[in-house]
Image: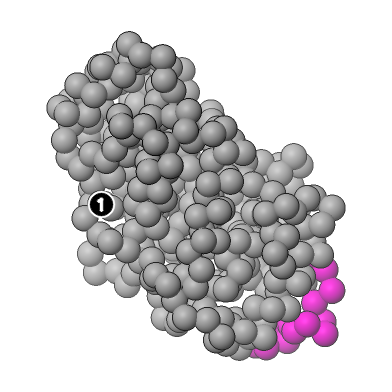
Amino acid sequence: MDNIFSITDLTFEAVALDVFRYQYQQVEIYQLYCNSLKRDPSTVKCLADIPFLPIEFFKTHTVIAKEKNAEKVFESSGTTGQVSSKHPVADLSLYERSFEKCFELFYGDVKEYVILALLPSYLERDNSSLAYMAKNLIERSHQNASGFFLNEFEKLYDWLDVLKNGKRKVMLLGVTFGLLDFAEQYKIDFPDLIVMETGGMKGRREELTREEVHLQLRTAFDVADIHSEYGMTELLSQGYSKANGIFHSPPWMRLLTRDMYDPLTIQKENATGAVNVIDLANLYSCSFISTGDLGRTKADGSFEILGRMDNAEIRGCNLMAL
């Protein structure tokens, strides 16, 4: 299974079935869940047969291969009173290879960018997978101008004002409520800036639609489009949108939708349903996760996130409803 990052559409199903067989044997809670559905390697013959573990299990169980120990445990940023998800990661190099290769796939060499990260609250925790990714990308950019900002809006504005007159590519990666807070206080004419929101309102602000958020951000930064990232604590891969909320994922990650009233039924493209994620980089945990997000997939593999299921918790890492 060392071919995860060289996967193609033609090999995806075969690799996914190999990963399923491994995780069935190694991840105890996943095996128990599969057995409860009467699904095991003898009955799972194609991608559609693979069970998807409900994401809530990351709040109540340790989801890791029994032959592995965690190098780091990432934890979700759930709002006060909620139980946080915990994702024990046995091999951080898998996570690093995943987000590095994914960034390169969609944006090119990270060394060509100044990476600015506006991640208030996430920076105050040492177990945030988003902060870990941002730190790594900042370091790999090898740009002295790259760096983190907590709630230093004036400093960020001054830094952007300097960078807009240069020739370097600049990306501002920000949690949504942080970007909105900045946008209410500052306006800057920087049309070449890549503004990427990662979701995450965390009860800090009134919930807004994606269109409302992106309109405010486009106006504040004078950019044509707002980029978005789709990721979560329980995954080791991300999808990216460069405009209009249409996401693309790397070859080792795939989204499917399930029928909201028959969760074992996978739907065809263009049907709205609950989101199932296959993340083959999540090798030593669970690569097949049933989320509480609503979405729609397209024939070319792209997807939209349309919000949350009514009975699902609002989580810090989710995008806003349309």
Residue at the disc numbered 1: 123
Magenta-highlighted residues: 35-47
Q: Main secondary structure of the magenta part?
A: loop
Q: Is residue 73 above or below residue 136?
A: below
- On the image, which quarter does residue 59 sit in? bottom left
- Colour basis: one colour
Q: Is residue 41 above or below residue 231?
A: below
Check disc 1 and report its element: helix, strand or loop: loop
Residue at position x 52%, y 81% in the image: 68
Amino acid, disc 1: Leu
Asked if the stretch drawn in magenta spans residue 173, the answer is: no
Q: Would residue 179 appear left or right of 280 to someone viewing this image?
A: left
Mark 1 nearby-residue class (10 Å; few <14, some 14–19, many ≥20): some
Instruction: Report x, y in % for residue 108.
Output: 57, 32
Instruction: Report x, y in % for residue 319.
Output: 43, 46
- On the image, which quarter does residue 156 sit in? top left
Q: Would residue 230 appear left or right of 202 to someone viewing this image?
A: right
Q: Would residue 248 appear left or right of 305 to someone viewing this image?
A: right
Residue at position x 42%, y 36% in the image: 141
Q: In the depicted view, which residue is nearer to us: 303 or 141?
A: 141
Q: In the depicted view, which residue is nearer to us: 137 or 258?
A: 137
Viewer can see residue 7: yes
Residue at position x 29%, y 69% in the image: 82
How many tags in the picture?
1
Tell me the quarter of the image containing the N terminus.
Answer: bottom right
Viewer can see residue 304: no
Instruction: Report x, y in % for residue 293.
Output: 51, 55
